[in-house]
């Protein structure tokens, strides 16, 4: 991703630009208002102080790369960082930006498209034996609170039931209770509830009284899974990080 693309991503996350259509980028009312104030410069430091959403986007817990729990900026490597850590941090930055763009794009789609998307995702993840015909969206006119099904065997004796909510608002406990009721009506033992938003504490804590198992997937996890299982994404570049093979030289040195 080049500098112009990163600048566009940063300004969008700060609410200063928007992308109403493919290949169309325009300034937002907030962006126009900011230009009127004529800031000396608009850089990462300015955007972090201007927009809380951008500040959250631009920081990451570095635990997975350094073991240090201090949140630091993606694009500002520390002087003590090794090249390996710099590369890992940059990779996470690209992944996070891609996930944010994916979630925006998913929210722009229709409810029917989203229902098919979640079925495709579970198939890509290997459920249903990774066979597309083993997953399908239920007709909206008679879905009974179930948006999709994944057959895990040819006879359909083991089925995953899906609820898909393309929402902006938080999903609360009553929605999970409705899904539990729908699962009970179908005699289901496995359910997946996927949303583009997030779940309240009450929703997360809501569980069936029987042995039925429900998995909740929020918008952030959805985007991460789409990247991991190559749904709606394609490979742009591939890099091979190499190291010296000391075993090759041991015979000569011995």
Image: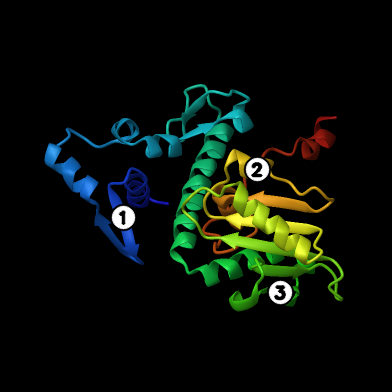
Q: Relative to residue 31, is residue 126 depicted above or below?
A: below
CA neighbours of label 1 inside 10 A, class few (<14), some (14 to 19), many (20+):
some
Q: Residue at label 1?
A: 18
CA neighbours of label 3 inside 10 A, class few (<14), some (14 to 19), many (20+):
some
Q: Residue at label 2?
A: 204
Q: Residue at x 69, y 38 (%)?
A: 244
CA neighbours of label 2 inside 10 A, class few (<14), some (14 to 19), many (20+):
some
Mark 3 and mark 2 lie on one chain; the one further toward the N terminus is 3
Q: How many marks?
A: 3
Q: Residue at label 3?
A: 132
Q: Is residue 153 visible?
A: yes
Q: Relative to residue 4, is residue 129 depicted above or below?
A: below
Between the C-alphas of marks 3 and 2, the distance is: 30 Å
Dot in front, 3 or 2 = 2
Horizontal relation, residue 239 to residue 25: left or right: right
Please tell me whether mark 1 sits on a helix, a strand or a loop.
strand
- The percent coordinates of residue 25 (x first, y second) are 29, 59
Q: Is residue 126 visible?
A: no
Mark 1 and mark 2 lie on one chain; the one further toward the N terminus is 1
Front-lying residue, 69 or 161: 161
Mark 3 and mark 1 lie on one chain; the one further toward the N terminus is 1
- The percent coordinates of residue 207 (x first, y second) are 73, 46
- The percent coordinates of residue 172 (x first, y second) are 57, 47
Between the C-alphas of marks 1 and 2, the distance is: 32 Å
Front-lying residue, 178 or 251: 178
Please tell me whether mark 3 sits on a helix, a strand or a loop.
helix
Label number found at residue 131: none
- The percent coordinates of residue 98 (x first, y second) are 49, 52
The quadrant holding residue 47 is: top left
């Amino acid at each position: 991703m080049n500098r112009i693309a990163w600048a566009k991503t940063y300004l969008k996350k700060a609410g200063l630009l928007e992308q109403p259509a493919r290949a169309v980028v325009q300034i937002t009312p907030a962006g126009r208002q900011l230009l009127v104030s004529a800031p000396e410069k608009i850089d990462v430091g300015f955007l972090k102080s201007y927009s809380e959403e951008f500040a959250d986007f631009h920081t990451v817990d570095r635990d997975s790369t350094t073991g240090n729990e201090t949140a630091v900026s993606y694009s500002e490597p520390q002087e003590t960082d090794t090249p390996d850590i710099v590369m890992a941090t940059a990779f996470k930055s690209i992944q996070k930006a891609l996930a944010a763009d994916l979630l925006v794009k998913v929210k722009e789609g229709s409810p029917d498209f989203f229902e098919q998307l979640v079925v495709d995702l579970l198939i890509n993840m290997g459920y249903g034996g990774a066979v597309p015909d083993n997953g399908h969206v239920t007709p909206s006119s008679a879905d009974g609170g179930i948006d999709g099904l994944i057959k895990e065997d040819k006879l359909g004796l083991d089925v995953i039931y899906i609820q898909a909510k393309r929402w902006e608002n938080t999903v609360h406990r009553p929605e999970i209770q409705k899904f539990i009721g729908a699962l009970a009506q179908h005699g289901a033992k496995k359910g997946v509830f996927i949303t583009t938003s997030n779940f309240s504490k009450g929703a997360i804590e809501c569980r069936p009284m029987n042995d039925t198992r429900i998995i909740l997937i929020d918008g952030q996890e959805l985007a991460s899974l789409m990247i991991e299982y190559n749904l709606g994404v394609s490979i742009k570049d591939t890099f091979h990080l190499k190291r010296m093979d000391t075993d090759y030289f041991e015979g000569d040195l011995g």
